[in-house]
Image: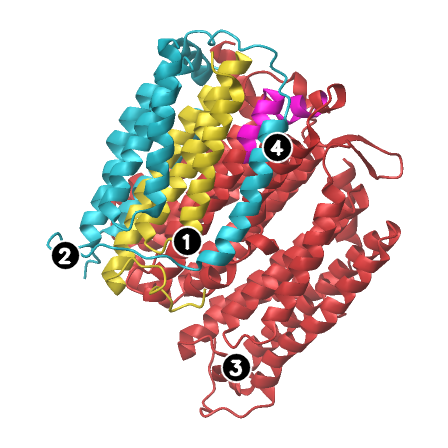
Chain colours: A yellow, B red, C cyan
Amino acid sequence: MIPLPYYLLISAFMFIMGVIGVLTRKNAIIVFMSIELMLNAANLSFVAFSSFLGNIYGQLFVFFVMAVAAAEAAVGLAIIISIFRNKATVNLDEINLLKW
Amino acid sequence: MNSLNFFNNLGYAWPETIITLFLAILVIYNLVYPQARRALGIISLLGIALALGFTIQQMWTQFPTDPSWLSGFTRMLIPDKIGIFFKVIILIATAYVVLFTEFSEELRGTFDRAGEYYALIFGMLLGMMFMISANNFILLYVSLELVSYSSYVLAGFMKTSERSSEASMKYIIYGGVASGIMLFGISLMFGMTGTFYYFDISRLLMMININSVLFLISGIMIFTGIGYKISSVPFHFWTPDVYEGAPTTITAYLSVASKAAGFAALIHLVRNCFVGAVATDGYWVMLSHFYWKELLVYLAILTMTVGNLTALWQDNLKRMLAYSSIAHAGYLLAAMSVLSNQGLIAMVVYFSVYLLMNLGAFFIVILIQNKTGSENIDDYNGLGTRMPFLGACLGIFLVSLTGLPPTAGFIGKLYLFLALVDAKMIILAIIALLNSVISLYYYIRVLRHMYLTKGNNESPITPSFGSVLIALSLAVPVLLFGIYFTPLIEWAKTVVLR
Amino acid sequence: MDLYLILFYFFAIITLVSAFFVVTTRNVIYAAFNLMLTLFGVAGFYVLLGADFIAIVQLIVYVGGILILLIFGVMLTNKITDTDIKSGFLNRVPGLLIVGTFAGILIGTLLKSTWRIAAPLPPPVAGLVGIGNLLMTEYTLIFEILGAVLLIALIGAASIARKQSN
């Protein structure tokens, strides 16, 4: 069997990749992808803990997170479209009417 | 668990049930009568009034002191009076925001989508109600996301306005990151404790030895999600942009209601996970796994200082009020950092006052924006003589936000300082005092522009009767509680001490 | 070297490499496809961890739903003929410094931590049945709120994305 820390390290790696993506990328859609990476990292560690603790609640949370993430993707896409209509760009450094 | 049990348990969630019901009514009514915009506002007010009635009635309900025995889904809700207090605050704020919408000119272009506007407000309201009473990390996460999604869309509701959709974009990116970090923190917490219930976690913390560094990391990550809702400093970057770009009614709503929900969630998290017992003098005996005191003190100092100093050179009034709301979050965090019942009383008093004065200030900003089409401070020149009544009201709210007597803001600050001094946190009290002095400059600057600078236009502006009524209903209590504050304090004591 | 180990390392390599490329590639479409591989890899881990229901939901919701939405986003905001869907990097140095520190602390602690788990337990009771039972009993409330979340997301997305009618 694979010990628990292996899964956690993979999850931590994905999470950190997500944070790096959010901080360094300027395309809004890639930033959303990075956020999905962060959510998936959390989900992976939930399922790993759930399985190693013999406790179903972690899996339950993952189920909720997936539904919520789907909603987030829908709202995010709608906002991207709305801003694209106004400014014809999704690059975050061209979205600068308000000071960052 | 049988179905009967379900309906018995529903008694704990009547206000939330009513809000859900009215959310459905609003959506269906809008489908049947797409043109009836006024009626939607009236239905919303009706729903809020009903929910408010049931919430206030819960004040007198005898709840079990140890909710851990509860069965079914009520195990997830913390039925205590501090939660009920914050629910009342949120319901009142929602009612005012629905009223403000009637007066907002900038939302006129979106009136064909009024049904969606009210439905989203009700969705946000529902999320905040559950966020306040959450006793379970899953419930906290899901309801926080419900609040977030509604507010993302509401912030970008004027979709033809570039500023508005930009605000919405920035909001969703920061929000998505904050909730992702929070989720990872919750997963670490789950790994260490194997449960999502606050009460179970606190019981476990008393018994077993937990890896403290990892616990610290996960605690800070969980705080990120809440800190972003209350716009505490390292997580405040979205606040000025979103507050400036969003429709002003929504800005007012975010600055009061969503902050109230965040603070209530924070109070419940700290009090139910990390407090071992309450000593006889009202101080909380903390479990030694997390340094809440240090964290909150440093965050409070940072938050109020950054908020106040940045507010100094803002020329847009909405942006200035955004930084001022960050500063107020700092004062509230300072009250929280006392970690005692006195601190909680100070928070309750402060928030009741903050509700009135902040909503009032934003309402006047909406009315002035209707006439001048701008929130820039230079366009406020000479407004004091053009609209004497509204100018006086804005004066009252701004003086109260500074915390000067004879307004209610002074009472809020007074109780905050009393709680800090009582806890021997003199340095924090001095820093808060200095911050209040700084804030005097930028609040009074607005009044100087209004009364001492001559404007280009001299024609008087007469406000409508309805707006005068609403402004009075906010300004009179601000003055009244500044002079006769005993009922407010007594109420805060019953809320906190049961 | 049994099959389980081989599968684990296989999924691990897929996940780590593709997650890296999601963040570093300059082309949005490549990022989307790399994200798909990451999601597949994570679904593989779910199967290895005995969470088969979650693995299937992962494939249906993430790969079938969210990823498609994101690709729609790419297509709607870039003209198809426009090949220049490149995206650059923004404020790299301070961000990477913060993340580096954070990553060091996080991974260090994760490695050093002792978990309350002595030995890996057998996978929990049949995932689907357990989750179904919980959703209908203890977690009914959250399940209902989830309905409200989806309704609000639907209303909000439709409201903000459709063209302004005059």
Are tags 1 and 2 found on a single chain? no
Residue at the image point whose x is 75% and y is 61% from the top: B413
Q: Residues within 10 Å of mark 3 (few under 14, many from 20)?
A: some
Residue at the image point whose x is 36% and y is 16% from the top: C6
On the rendered structure, is B471 left or right of C21?
right
Q: Amino acid at mark 4?
A: Thr
State the CA–CA distance, disc 1 to disc 2. Answer: 24 Å
Q: Which residue is mark 2?
A: C82
Closer to us: mark 3 or mark 1?
1
Furthest-left residue in this view:
C81
* Residue B192 drawn in magenta: yes
**SS class, disc 4:** helix
Which span of residues is magenta-colored? B185-203
The answer to which quarter of the image holds residue B369 is bottom left
Residue at the image point whose x is 62% and y is 22% from the top: B193
Are tags 2 and 3 found on a single chain? no
Q: Which residue is mark 1?
A: A24
Assess whether mark 3 and mark 2 are in contact (beta carbons under 8 angstroms): no
Q: Amino acid at mark 3?
A: Met
Closer to us: mark 4 or mark 2?
4
Q: Which residue is mark 4?
A: C109
Are tags 4 and 3 found on a single chain? no
Residue C39 visible at all: yes
Residue A41 in percent (x, y) is at 44, 32
Assess whether mark 1 and mark 4 are in contact (beta carbons under 8 angstroms): no
State the CA–CA distance, disc 2 to disc 3. Answer: 54 Å
Residue B50 visible at all: no
On the rendered structure, is B298 left or right of B17?
right
**SS class, disc 2:** loop
Q: Which residue is mark 3?
A: B387
